[in-house]
Image: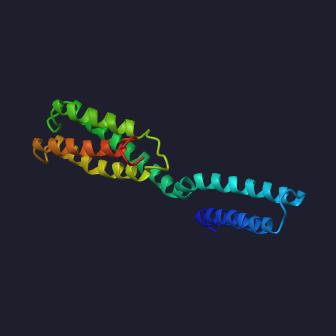
């Protein structure tokens, strides 16, 4: 049985338990010792159901959150490593290396990618963080293409837009979402 099925069966079990107590309490007189015992069990089970209901979305999202955490961690770390390698190539003077001025583009990109690799991935909003990690890949590819001279330097505008999109996806307090 998968964890999602197990969670759903536990939740359904609590609901059935409460329904059973409700049926049992209907036949009892208020003030009887048995009534008080069943009533206490009904209240206890209802509290457990309310607590389970509050935890249910996080429990159901856990497998997806775990995948998002791996995607975020390794995507951002990989981008930071690529940025660091590109910074070394740009900093070392050689006839085939790009200009050192490109470090002004590479260093902030690498620092942001390194900071992003430490992002905590909560159950709520994990899909936004996964999307940000995926959007980061074409942004990094564009940075590499600009620095190595494969595309025009005007593509820096697209990199800036990409950074804004990634930053927006990683924001914690989006209006109406959280």
Location of residue 83 with respect to 6 vertically, above or below: above
43 relative to 178, above or below: below
Where residue 65 appears, as percent x and y from the top left, is 49, 53
Which residue is rendered at x = 81% and y = 60% of the image? 38
Tell which of 52 and 34 is nearer to you.
Answer: 34
Front residue (pair 22, 80): 22
Q: Which of the 4 image quarters holds residue 171? A: top left
Indicate how the structure is coloured in the image: rainbow
Query: Is 16 placed above or below 174 here?
Result: below
In the figure, is residue 54 to the left or right of 109?
A: right
Does residue 144 appear left or right of residue 152 in this picture? right
Q: Is residue 88 visible?
A: no
- When asked about the image quadrant of residue 39, the answer is bottom right
- The answer, for residue 13, to whether it is visible in the render is yes
Residue 122's spot in the image, x, y percent?
A: 48, 46
Specify whether 81 is left or right of 35.
left
């Amino acid at each position: 049985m998968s964890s999602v099925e197990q969670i759903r069966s536990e939740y359904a079990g609590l609901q059935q338990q409460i329904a059973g107590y409700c049926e049992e309490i209907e036949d009892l007189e208020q003030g009887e010792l048995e009534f008080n015992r069943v009533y206490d069990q009904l209240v206890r089970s209802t509290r457990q159901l309310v607590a389970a209901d509050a935890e249910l979305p996080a429990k159901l999202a856990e497998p997806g959150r775990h995948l998002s955490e791996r995607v975020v961690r390794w995507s951002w770390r990989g981008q930071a490593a690529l940025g660091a390698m590109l910074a070394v190539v740009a900093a070392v003077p050689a006839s085939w290396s790009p200009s050192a001025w490109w470090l002004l583009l590479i260093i902030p990109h690498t620092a942001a990618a390194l900071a992003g690799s430490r992002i905590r991935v909560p159950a709520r909003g994990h899909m936004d963080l996964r999307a940000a990690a995926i959007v980061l890949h074409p942004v990094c590819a564009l940075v590499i293409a600009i620095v190595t001279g494969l595309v025009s330097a005007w593509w820096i505008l697209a990199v800036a837009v990409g950074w804004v999109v990634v930053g927006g996806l990683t924001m914690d307090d989006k209006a109406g979402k959280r």
